Image (cartoon, rainbow, N blue to C red):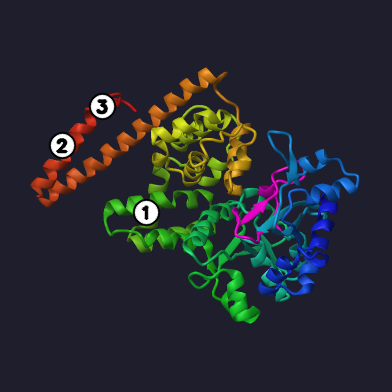
Amino acid sequence: ALAAAADFFYGQLHHSAAGQIARRYVEQRGLPARVVQEQRIGYAPNQWDGLLNHLRKAGIDQRVGIETGLLVASSSDRIYDRFRQRLMFPITDDRGRVVAFGGRSLDGAEPKYLNSPETVLYHKGRMLYNLVRAREACRQVRQVVLVEGYLDLLAFHACGFYRVAATLGTALTAQQVRLLTRVADEVVLLYDGDEAGQRAMFRAAPLFLEEGLAVTCPRLPAGMDPDDFLKDQGLAGFEELLKQREDLGKVAMDDVLSGWDGTTAGKVSVIERLQPLFDAVRQPVVRAEYLQVVGERLGLAESVVQSQLQHKRRAPSDRTMAQAPPGSMTSDGPHPQAIEENILRVVVRYPCLISKLKESGAVEHFREGRLRAVAQALTELDPDREPSSAGLCDRLADSELQSIVARLMMQEAPYGDLEAACLYFGDRLATLKQRQVRQSRKDLLQSIGQAERDGDRQKLQNLLQQFQESCQAPGIPQPNESS
């Protein structure tokens, strides 16, 4: 079915009248015919049953189309094409077989990029776009460039550069990094030059450090993506940019260190923020270099930095949270994000609780960014179209959020039926509220101390009143009670 779909999409791009819109887009993006042919780029027409009818004519059962993510079955048993009015990018496995597709919207429809759902053949967190071609190109120079998008990668191909792979619409995973260790000794991380791209790049640093894989990053001009840069300066410009690449771990550390406020407390805070990075380092030489950088910037002996890192109990990184085994976080330990994850685990199993989550206002107190994004997306779903648990992923536009929800659904639940789930849900919400109040009290105490040092009597009086009111809040443990 997948090979037949690839042929159908390719034919629609090149031979159908409807494909004119896609042909025009390909031309505007500057993709030469050679690249389009090599990658078998295609077009999904703006029809509900274009591919469905093609598969029928080919004698392919529609159930196979559903299982491979090409077709969608609605709650009323209507079968229709998943991809419509999109430029289509076939995704292949390590043998070159088509296992999935990515589709870029051509009419402004959201999501801008739509990927196949995960299937028996396709696990987006374990694959990379174009890795087979990149592996061949890396035989001479064991260095690979990693970008975020299909079109960024194809811009390199248009320049004749093939040592490049791309993630598949999700945050980089440990499995993907392990794939890269098989083809290269150095990864050049080339994400967008905007703030979101830089943040994604910094989050990826611990994954490479844990595998002992060298990772560097050239700095794209602000607001530029790799496609823009190559169109503006060509491959020669990129090769010059490559000469200026820096160690990603040091760049990530510099980003944190630049936020130091000059205080002693600030030193502790900075080192705590660097903890996940140091926890991931496996090579003694790299660790020694990083300790030296931090010590020099903060005016501390390296031994003091090392002591502070060891003093703080290791906090799990985003990667650890995202890959925790099913059933490992049915309680609210060992880390604070577990509370948020347990709340969402109930909601994705019983979507009727989404309205309760929204009414509680708990989402704004989620600390983990991706879990907060999932919670926010769930509360923004149309309340008049309450989804089933199974159909929840299809209602979310972002593929990364879909992946998180799918993982939560597979984890073991610490409750039996809806009644027990409601009690569990209410208890977790109360725990989250208690955590927020404790944090608020902690912040107030710090502000009170600062007001005392500043001699600001009016501000001090106001802050003391706020603290007293927080201590009188019903249902919240008092400051001297255990947490």
Crowding around mark 1 (Cα neighbors within 10 Å: few <14, some 14 to 19, many 20+) is: many
Estimate the x, y position of residue 464 in percent, counting from the top left.
15, 38
**Where 130 sits versus 80, above or below?**
below
Q: In which quarter of the image is residue 439?
A: top left
**First in sequence: mark 2 vs mark 1:** 1
- In space, the residues marked 3 and 2 are separated at their CA atoms by 15 Å
Q: Which residue is drawn at 30% across and 24% down?
A: 475
What amino acid type should be assigned to the residue bearing mark 3? Gln
Q: Does the magenta stretch include residue 128?
A: yes
Q: Quadrant of residue 468?
A: top left
- In space, the residues marked 3 and 1 are separated at their CA atoms by 30 Å
Query: Which mark is in front, 3 or 2?
Result: 2
Q: Mark 2 points at which residue?
A: 465
Quick check: can you spot residue 397?
yes
Q: In this view, does 309 lie to the left or right of 227?
A: left
Q: Residue at x 21, y 45 (%)?
A: 447
Residue 270: assigned label: 1
Badge 1 marks a residue whose secondary structure is helix
Quick check: can you spot residue 289?
no
Q: Give the range drawn in magenta.
A: 105-129
Query: Which mark is in front, 2 or 1?
Result: 2
Crowding around mark 3 (Cα neighbors within 10 Å: few <14, some 14 to 19, many 20+) is: some
Q: Mark 3 points at which residue?
A: 478
Our reading of the magenta stretch's main secondary structure is loop
Q: Quadrant of residue 186?
A: bottom right
Q: Is residue 258 left or right of residue 474?
A: right
